[in-house]
Image (spheres, grey):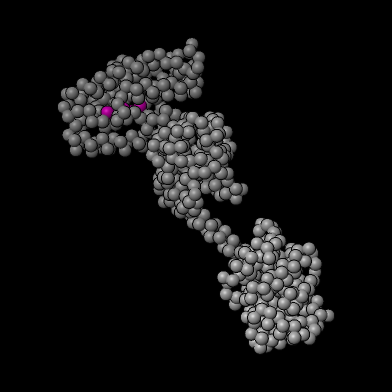
Amino acid sequence: MTKHSKYLLKESSLIQMLDPLVADWNNTQRPDPETAASILAAEIDFSRLNHLFDNFLEAIGISIALIGLDGKVLASSKWQRACTEFHRVNDTTRQRCHESDVKLSAKMQQGNNYSIYKCGNGLTDCATPLVINNEHVANLFIGQFFLAEPNLASFAEQAAQLALDKDQYLQAIAEVPIVNEAKLPALLNLLSSLAQQIAELTMANRRYAQTIDTVEQKIAARTQELELQNLILSMISKGASLAEILHCMVSQVEILHPEMRCSVLLLDDTGQHLRHGAAPSLPDFYNEAIDGLAIGIGQGSCGTAAFTGEVVVVENINSHPYWQPFLALTQAINIAACWSFPIKNAAGKILGTFAIYHSKPCQPSAALRKKIINYSNLAELAISRSLSSEQIRRLAFYDVLTDLPNRRLLEERLQHAMLSSKRRKSYCALMFVDLDNFKPINDRHGHKMGDLVLQQVAQRIRSVVREADTVARFGGDEFIVLLDDIAKNKHHSRLRASQIASKITATICEPLTIGDNPLISHNCSCSIGLMLFSGDQASADLLLRQADSAMYLAKSRGKNQFCWYQP
């Protein structure tokens, strides 16, 4: 007996042989567990065959087992008493059974369609391959049986040699059926056909269930995406701020994809830098470090994507040249991959970037790319809506030519100044500024050049007042300056307003360059009407009329000066 056989006998002796098929059936010829046959066999639930095999045993007395190519019992009936109580229990007879099992399995591996073998214990076994989808996945065994009337004397002698209970052993042998060898192929064909049909049906049902499960998962994922879309659309329609919308969107995307950390960066008004939009899962120090990132090739994934307008997928940050200047940052927050998708409006203009960070090197699948594009489109909708709202607001409250507050916003700020001065008991001043000789510019150089002069005048006036003060374009070549909360002392307030008026007059008198040609210039002056108020006036309209009256007084006195309103 070989060392390997002794090992098998020792291992088998530890098993209670209620089912002898637990033993290795093809220990000598096991295939790679990753073969197509092994993978296919693993997909099939053969348990439904157990009941069928038991019924077959009760009907004709023949035991059946389906054994995988790796020696695993896939399905089996009960076994004859001669096997369970004698042959598989005794060391000598168990070895003979094992030899029979191995030889039959070997013949199946060699491509035989039908094999029969009489074991050393005097009983016969038979085997045939089970083929599913053109793959040999298992072997169907039947046994133990006789092909002819058994010689009971030889079995009595075997009982004596092996110290078996003779009467019980012969009684068990008598229970073993006798099978006509000519009927064995048909019998095996019937059993293998039933096993094949049941296996294929089980496999089809399992694959159908897997398909249903996959479809349900896709539906659930799509439902979550639609819910996210509806949530963002609802926030947009309700007028939520862009910061709130982007924060919500990024947070929801991260819930749908827990392995991701996401960021939205917004292109600034200059179109040269990216500003922080939303990145709730990234630490503040990282967001602050990339806030204001210049766009361009090599400026990480986002700076490059914003510059090129193309998706930039960096699978491994540590080795990619775009990220070398930022490795200290990325290593501090443990990110190894970054995919950046440009956010574009319908006209193709870059609005920002939608970035996905991963802690391990990786690339997006085609399906994930589509999802991220959908997320970036959702971000585009929110950003474009915010920009449109801001543009509408500017059109409503700001002059298009000079970008100064228009008459509507001026009136709101004037009302606020009146209430504030009354509450604080401080003084404010209102100036009505009118250019003295603006018409010749339009007549000589055209309205386009006149517009350039108005823009320069607006900048000059704004340069000499405080940030809290208001410079508005009232119409044509008329400007209004509102000095808010100057001082509580009336004399000091009047003095300060006069100083500002003098500065405005002086800066406007400086030569104005028209267009790009330095040889074309114009000298302009202005007349300014001033009035002081402390919140006790009747209306904003009255204040404007009083300042306008003072301005005409300045013109009547020779222009290029300021005058205070005289009741």
On the picture, is 301 further left or further right than 19?
left
Whether the magenta-drawn stretch holds residue 328 is answered as no
Range of the magenta residues?
479-483
Furthest-top residue in this view? 519
Residue 457 coordinates in the image, percent (x, y)? 39, 22
Name the one closer to the observer, 174 or 560: 174
Which residue is painted at 35% across and 36% down in the image? 409
Please say whether residue 388 is visible from this viewpoint.
Answer: no
- Residue 339 drawn above or below residue 435: below
Residue 113 sits in quarter: bottom right
Give the quadrant of the N terminus: bottom right
Estimate the x, y position of residue 328 in percent, counting from the top left. 45, 33
| Up-down relation of residue 353 to residue 19 (above or below) | above
Q: Position of residue 65 (x, y in %)?
A: 68, 74
Q: Is residue 461 left or right of residue 113?
A: left
Viewer-proximal residue, 335 or 488? 335
Count of picture labels: 0
What is the chief secondary structure element of the magenta stretch? strand
